[in-house]
Image (tube, grey):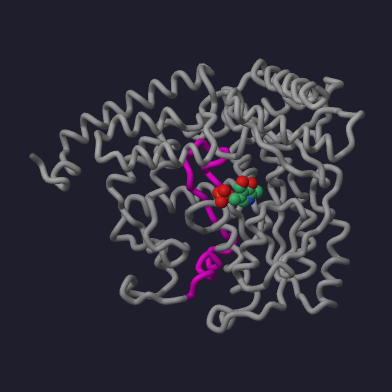
Amino acid sequence: MQSPLDAAFDPEAFRILGRQVVDLLADRLSSSLRGEGKVRPATGPEAEYQHWKTLMESGTGAAFPFLEEFVARAIYLHHPRYVGHQVCPPAPTAALAGLVAELLNNGMAVYEMGPSATALERWIIEQTAHKIGFEKGAGFLTSGGTLAMLTALLGARARKLGSDSVRAGTEPRWAVITSEEAHYCAGRAVHVMGWGSDGLLRIPVDSRFRIRTDLLDQAHEDAVARGRTPVALVGSACTTSTGSYDDLHALADFCQRRGLWFHVDGAHGAAVAFCEELRPRIAGIERADSVILDFHKLLLTPALATAVLFRDPACSWAAFEQRAQYLWEASHRDEWFNVGRRSFECTKLSMSLKIAALWHAHGEELFAENLRRVHASAAVFATLIAQDPRFDLATDPQSNIVCFRLRTPDLSDARADSLHRSIRTEILEEGGFYLVQTELHARVWLRTALMNPFTKEADLRALLERVVQSATALQNKASA
Ligand SMILES: Cc1ncc(COP(=O)(O)O)c(C=O)c1O
């Protein structure tokens, strides 16, 4: 009888389990890609908790059936009818690279703990910075867009307010400007920096949900008059709800005129830098001081893997000046290879391996092809909606995100909003599609992010019919 430790580390057991798990996932991938079965199981949170609680408390058991059970109850992002949040269906090569990274567990705060991952991270950052248009840019990878936003804005704070701000902290008399459609992580970052919710100035958007650049000067002056001095501006490339790209040149001009740090939240949309035809959407991004870009959104990499890029390489050190002598021998800035000096994380997963393996095995064209496909799907879907008198389109898609709603002339705004919420709940519970919802101009809209390059026009047509069917059933029920 093996001890628990010996059993957990038995290489032969690992080999057997690994083969079983890869077979399971390959079968799952195959049926998901063919659009078989549901996208998402129907269980609610309490029932799901009870299920796993019972299983966990039933004693120890074999690993394979346990993992099989997890896979059976998962949401399937590879299913063509997954049109929900902006998380990609990962390419299998990247997922397997993730397995390699996790077993080896080369933590990356210091070079010694993750030499290859550190070297690959530098290569990825150099290539990505180059695509963004930063001639010499530098940066690092971090765990997601939210943390990346905070790190970039901490860098902005240190650069704009001086190193004293790092030593002594700051008073809440500073502000960051962004649009009312910016992702909530901008507000969180400002809050964490101690400037409160008043420290985020949210500028209204135009009819296509882009920041109103004509309002910026007045907003700046009003803020200063209130005792809030803006130090940075966050442009969206693109926004989360509608995939709208701010006018980055106009924002860069404004920042230059007012002496502000220009940060571009490209968590979702800066990925178009990898596709020549789509790159014009981020014209002006090369003028930013910092940019973030999620590989786990449009670049087929499992979460989380985000690049934080700085136009001036020296700024990539700005966020954290603190010293940890036991980790670093020297404190000079040329130590690019001790990435923990620049990123929030101390121990960090070798996330570069997932990106690099994909890049190496399939070439950059993989990213471009995916970007072309998902953007084309969005254009097709928007056309279907625009040509169908039963629906309204929120705006022509600038990215792979499409928001729409039913035309309901006979319903009050409140009833129409409630109907759309119910439609989404019903579709979610049935599990045939996964879509989300958003609020635009205080109204509820159904929202799709076409993340899966294998979603076909037939799937999108079926989604529209499903929405109509659900609306009819709900309205019949209400009037019965
Ligand atoms: C524009 C934008 N910025 C930031 C984020 C946050 O990124 P993450 O989910 O990687 O933390 C998102 C997530 O959807 C986003 O759409």
Q: Residue at x 80, y 25 (%)?
A: 475
On the image, the x and y values in percent for residue 318 come to 54, 70
Q: Is residue 298 magenta?
A: yes
Is 409 left, or right, of 182 in this rendering? right
Is 340 left, or right, of 241 in this rendering? left
Q: Which residues are magenta?
A: 294-321
On the image, the x and y values in percent for residue 433 come to 61, 26
In this view, 93 is above or below 479: below
Q: Quadrant of residue 443?
A: top right
Q: Residue at x 52, y 43 (%)?
A: 295
Outermost residue on the left side: it is 1
Q: Quadrant of residue 200?
A: bottom right
On the question of residue 450 being in view, the answer is: yes
In the picture, the quarter occupied by the N terminus is: top left
Front-lying residue, 327 or 239? 239
In this view, 196 is above or below 272: below
Outermost residue on the right side: it is 410
On the question of residue 380 being in view, the answer is: no
On the image, the x and y values in percent for residue 241 come to 71, 43
Q: Is residue 226 magenta?
A: no
Q: How many marks?
A: 0
Is 104 left, or right, of 358 in this rendering? left
Is 91 left, or right, of 211 in this rendering? left
Q: Residue at x 29, y 39 (%)?
A: 58
Q: Residue at x 24, y 33 (%)?
A: 62
On the image, the x and y values in percent for residue 284 come to 72, 51
Front-lying residue, 254 or 245? 245
